[in-house]
Amino acid sequence: MSSAALSRVGFSQAAIGAQANMTGPYVLPPLPYAYDALEPYIDAQTMHLHHDKHDASYVEHAAVAGRPDLASRTVEDLVAHLDSVPEQVRTAIRIQGGGDANHSFWWPTLSKNGGDAPKAELAKDIDAQFGGLSKFQEQFSKAAGSVFGSGWAWLTLASGGKLQIESSANQDSPLSNGRTPVLGIDVWEHAYYLKYQNRRPEYVAAFFHIVNWDFVSGQYAVAEKLQSA
């Protein structure tokens, strides 16, 4: 498994197959929890619109329809190797494919039972590279708050096993820059505006109550093994 495929880990293939009524070659992974599972931090209406409308649109318009040479590859692989994508569809795959990859990665990193703390090697490495969880949260929150307009903030694994905090505009993915996402937060307004309006810092603070650190820590362990293989 490549690092680009990590974002699909944890989804039931049978459940994904149940979404096969999408018109494009990719399918929308179902939410791994109920729409209201993340309340009061993220409301059910936002989750419904975000997943069933916004994410579904990215999946449906991932720009690979009628291109078997592209549709046979995962969207993560395409986003990770944009230079290998034909120029006439490269921008669409960067935007729509990036939206698909980012959201498919993001949904399972959230949980109604989240908000605990990183586990195992991830906990050790966050302590070593950021000075502890609280300092990491401060730096991550600053990155999320500094995104101008729409985008994401990320914790990524770079070559050499170094964790770093970064941000990206729109639906750009760290995969395109050779880095593996470990944790991300969507700071497009559609992710929070119904509940938080223009109070993005409140949304970012609420996010830490629903991080599925068990899942994130497991993904990190896989990414580390792949990088060292």
Image (cartoon, rainbow, N blue to C red):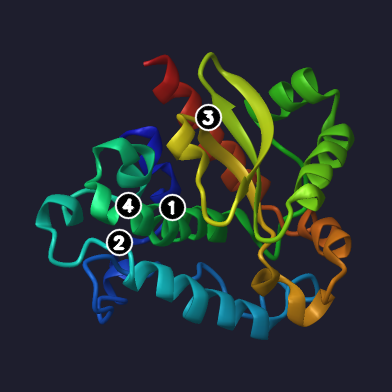
Amino acid carrying label 4: it is Val
Q: In this view, does 95 lie to the left or right of 161?
A: left
Disc 2 versus disc 4: nearer the observer? 4
Whole-angstrom CA distance, mark 3 to mark 4, is: 22 Å
Residue 211 coordinates in the image, percent (x, y): 70, 53
Q: Residue at x 73, y 72 (%)?
A: 192
What secondary structure is marked by label 1? loop
Q: Mark 1 points at which residue?
A: 10
Disc ID at residue 75: 4
Q: Which residue is drawn at 82% across and 61% down?
A: 206
Which residue is more in the foreground, 116 or 220? 220
What secondary structure is marked by label 2? helix
Disc ID at residue 13: 2
Amino acid carrying label 2: it is Gln
Whole-angstrom CA distance, mark 2 to mark 4, is: 16 Å
Evaluate if marks 2 and 1 touch, with contact meaning CB atoms under 8 Å apart. no
Which residue is more in the foreground, 82 or 10? 82
Mark 1, other Cα within 10 Å: few <14 / some 14–19 / many ≥20: few
Mark 4, other Cα within 10 Å: few <14 / some 14–19 / many ≥20: many
Residue 59 coordinates in the image, percent (x, y): 37, 68
Q: Name the residue under label 3.
A: 221
Earlier-in-chain disc, 1 versus 3: 1
